Image: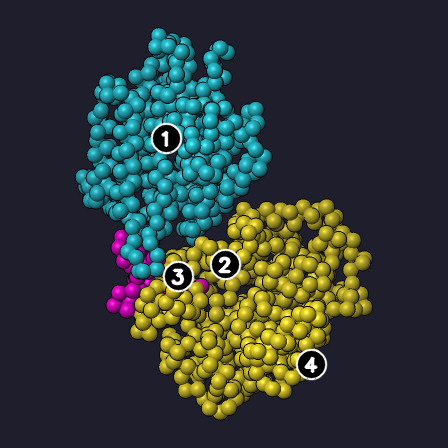
Amino acid sequence: MKTDGYNAGEHYDEMITEDGEIRAHYDEIFNHLKKTSSRKMGQLQHSANQTQRSMGMTFNVYHDNQGLEKILHLDIIPRIIPNSEWKKLEAGLKQRTQALNMFLQDIYNERRILKDGIVPSDLILKSRDYLEPCIGLTPPKGIWCHITGTDLVKSKDGEYYILEDNLRCPSGVSYMLESREIIKRVYPDIFNQKGVMPVSNYPTKLLRMLQNLSDKPKPVVGVLTPGVYNSAYYEHSYLALQMGVELVNGVDLIVENKRVYMQTTKGLQQIDVLYRRIDDTFLDPETFNPDSMLGVPGLFEAYKAGNIALANAPGTGVADDKAVYAYVPQIIKYYLGEEPILNNVPTYLCREENDRQYVLDHIEELVVKETNAAGGYGMLIGPKATPEEHAKFRELIKNNPTNYIAQPTLSLSTVPTLTEEGISGRHVDLRPYILYGEEIEVIPGALTRVALKKGSLVVNSSQGGGSKDTWVLY
Amino acid sequence: MLSRVANSIYWLGRYLERAENYARFIDVNFNLMQDLPIDLKEQWHPLIAATGDLPIYEKKCTGYEKNQVLYFLGFDAENPNSMLSAITNARENARIIRENLSKETWEKTNELYYMMQEGLEKKVWKKEDPRPFFEKVKNQILLIYGIADSSVARVDGWYFRQLGQFLERADKTSRILDVKYHILLPSDQEVGTPLDFLHWMALLKSVTAFNTYRRLYGNIDSSNVVEFLVLNKYFPRSIYHCIKEAEKCLHNISGNSGGGYLNSAEKAIGELRSKLEFAEVSEIIGFGLHEYLDDLQMKINRISMEVDANFFTIRSNNTSQPQSQSQG
């Protein structure tokens, strides 16, 4: 393939430096791309697409009439992370997860951090994600966020920045696992030479972590899904299959005497641990949203009675709010007495008057986000937006300041990607997965999401993003 | 296993078998048409009559032109029993219970679905000879059976799928046999003529039974063919054999090792099995073949309803109502 024209442009490129040098950890892949014909690369890409289709690696897009199931495009050129970089990421993510878990335990119980004025009380107590039924609760083993999928980006300075702590039900891990299987077939030789850390034991680790939540010697574990029409259904069934546990819907479960039972062909069978992929407020119509058709009446009472463990624990959403995000560096210092290892993106809270004025004055340079929205919705990218959109967001902010935060526009790093015009740099982010069981463990791999449109910064699968296999080197 | 999952596995078995049998139906008729003297017109009407979906067809179409009938049986999404509908439903059930299927079973079922979509795009029913396509679909389904046979543990899930498969097959064998009833001979005098033999041979070939039949009975004789396809103890598509196998599945599921019955589904199927076990072909002919088959189909439906009541019905926890799928 033609590689001469490949350059970093004005961004940080992960394969090539500003001076046109190939970074050492990309050597083999670069040489491989150089000597492989574009026809051959096209064929490999095609066969990867076919494999995804026959595996049924699909996600469902809301509000899309082009059919229910879509394939998340997997670009066959891997994203590579050298070991030294990974070590730092790993340490930083462990630190952050531990601090956020302590934060959750604190705000639902003693509220020391609020009393000490480190985090404003009203920001937490008035948040719609702060769940009153969880006040005074300590989940099994004191763990709140069992599975975290933190979003990071690499900026112009080559440093990683945390974008978002996803503490609720982060999805995408099945793509990390299945993509690896596909990409192994594309580069069998390089895989052996290069020394890529394995991710395939994730389901085993996940199962062990879930079993650890029950005191029974052989606890019954299940994955609770909203059902086949949920956008991540593929992943729910994939994880249940890989762990060898039941995939249950709300209708399969029934609560009696504060115990949760599955309805089987042989009658009722008790279930002890649920990896639930249903949002907090849909879990139990008796405690939360009474209109929920997905949940199980009485589930929360059973949880409170200690008869069922839920992962993640209900109530974690309050800690991954985009406004609380701004306080995470202080949260780390407060509980652990350590400096944060990983960078936060400087964040302006529109609820604060000074910050708000700055945002209104500099909206053209900033990214404005809704505090409670996910998936790239409800967001303004200042430098790319029209004056009308700027004006619209100024109004939105003035009318409801607590609902918005703003951050400087980050220059996302680029990674070589197979496109119609040959190999070309595309912007990426990074979502590693962290399991909190007997100890905190960061899985050496990640979901890399890539904005397939040239110059685009939006990597979300629902808005034209694709994915890449992520290699963490030994 | 979860009642909801058992339900889906059962219907996966039924829908796959249904699709495979539709491919066979279409094949019977092609075989038949090719052997007819040129002065006899092609008959596609009997095929639809035998599936029991004549009312749906007549609401949509007039006339029984080949392309129209092939589209209706193969690709019409508005026909709940077309191959396309059956395969879409099979795949949807498989998707719902994917964590209970082996990776290969799921992938081949998924490929089958895309195969049908491709056939739909390419308008296969308009081809002069679409048989290679139907053959391919049939083979893909047989591949799924083969994979399951050598990779699925013989626990509840296996027996629920087999149960669905055998009940569906019993129903469809009765319908294939019924095609013969609906095909018009030029006159009553043609019974027992070479033309009549041709019909019976085509029918046997469509269920891959011709050679086995030959070895067992030699000459083609209508009452022997009926005996073979309804009462034979060993042929895997005979109605008796299907019912007997389905009964074994039910016994395995309930842990019944002593015979008799432990639930109403076992009772219903036990009654039908013993009726077939002791029946004589002369009784069937005396009763009227078409009427006898009609009665069988109703009994099989009844068994399916009992299976549903015993294993699949779940208590509502106020979040949703239990759903039942098409009896077909």
Looking at the rendered structure, the kind of residue marked 1 is Gly
Image spot of residue A427 (x, y percent): 68, 64
* Mark 1 or 4: the one toward you: 4
Please tell me which residue is depicted at 31% across the width and 70% down the height of the picture.
Answer: A302
Instruction: Report which residue position mark 4 lands on.
Output: A361
* Residue in front for this viewpoint, A442 or A10: A10
Please tell me which residue is depicted at 64% across the width and 47% down the height of the picture.
Answer: A46
Colour used to depict chain A in the structure image? yellow
* Residue in front for this viewpoint, A20 or A107: A107
Instruction: Report which residue position mark 1 lands on.
Output: B52
Secondary structure at badge 1 equals loop
Image spot of residue A300 (x, y percent): 34, 70
Determine crowd level at label 2: few under 14, some 14-19, many 20+ residues with C-alpha closer than 10 A. many
Do dots 2 and 4 share one subunit? yes
Looking at the rendered structure, the kind of residue marked 4 is Asp
Q: Which residues are magenta?
A: A251-277
Please tell me which residue is depicted at 36% across the width and 14% down the height of the picture.
Answer: B220
Q: Which mark is residue A294?
A: 3
- Whether residues under marks 1 and 3 lie with C-beta atoms below 8 angstroms apart, the answer is no
Instruction: Report which residue position mark 2 lands on.
Output: A232
